[in-house]
Image (cartoon, rainbow, N blue to C red):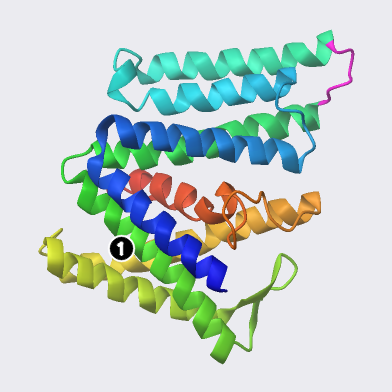
Amino acid sequence: MKQRILTGLIGGIGFIYLVWLGELPYTILVILLALIGYYEFLRMNQTPVFSWQGLIGLNTVLFIILTQNSLLAGIDRQQLMSLLLVSLFLYLALIVIKKNEINFDQVSYHLFGAMYIGFGFSYMLETRLMEHGFQFSLLVFLATFASDSGAYFTGKYLGKTKLWPEISPKKTIEGSIGGIVFAIIVSLLLNAMFQITEHFMLMIWAGILIAITGQFGDLIESALKRSKGVKDSGSLLPGHGGVLDRFDSLIFVFPILHLLHIL
């Protein structure tokens, strides 16, 4: 627990500082996190990173993220779709070239991972590039952290009813409700500090949505790890596991908030 807290404090402070800096430092950080996350995704499937499917997937992640950044502002959404179609074509071509050594299940796994991780981190970057992007980013990061912490401690001391035992045996309904309450409190506190919106109820709904989608994102990664028979996606962050273990909620929350026009 001490190692987990120490890693969280040091990493959290450094991360928030880079979010505040924005621009190139934050862009580089997001790209590195996404590529490491996809590397962990490959490892869970025992796919070598320097295999054809691994390299195509890494490049797909990179293309998706860079299209959200001014570094490649000339690439529009239509060109992004073209790049994704090229990636799909290359994956399908591998099935033929490798004479069925690579099957459709493997192609689906690698392409899904590239889009899941690529879009998740790209929306994280896009949020920071918005007007008042630091405040919006901070809201999502801290409300998600509050939801995770609230769910953990509420579940530990009050949890009785299992939420989804087949996927994550330790998670409880009481913990989930506690996470939602903590996320609402943090959202309201941040709004009081930064005046993100004048609408009180909007921040309450934002806290609820962040908590629910974050918990759902966590369950998705738990289901993925269970299907691959692994406990953690990696070991980069002592006490926390890998990048996907730490960012599983966030890479689900950011796209959902954008799709619902909350951000």
- Residue 23, image quadrant: top left
Left or right: residue 8 versus residue 129 is right
Q: Residue at x 24, y 41 (%)?
A: 21
Residue 140's x, y, as percent? 34, 56
Residue 94's x, y, as percent? 77, 14
Main SS, magenta residues: loop
Q: Residue at x 34, y 57 (%)?
A: 13
Image vertical order of residue 74 relative to residue 218, above or below:
above
Q: Amino acid at mark 1?
A: Ala
Front residue (pair 253, 244): 244
Image vertical order of residue 85 relative to residue 200, above or below:
above
Image vertical order of residue 213 relative to residue 5, above or below:
above
Q: Residues within 10 Å of mark 1 (few under 14, many from 20)?
A: many
Q: Residue at x 16, y 41 (%)?
A: 131
Left or right: residue 147 versus residue 200 is right
Residue 89 appears in view: yes
- Secondary structure found at label 1: helix
For the N terminus, the quadrant is: bottom right
Residue 257's x, y, as percent? 36, 50
The residue that mark 1 highlights is 206
Residue 69's x, y, as percent? 32, 26
Does residue 101 belong to the magenta stretch?
yes
Left or right: residue 153 versus residue 193 is right
Residue 262 appears in view: no
- The boundaries of the magenta stretch are 98-103
Front residue (pair 41, 100): 41
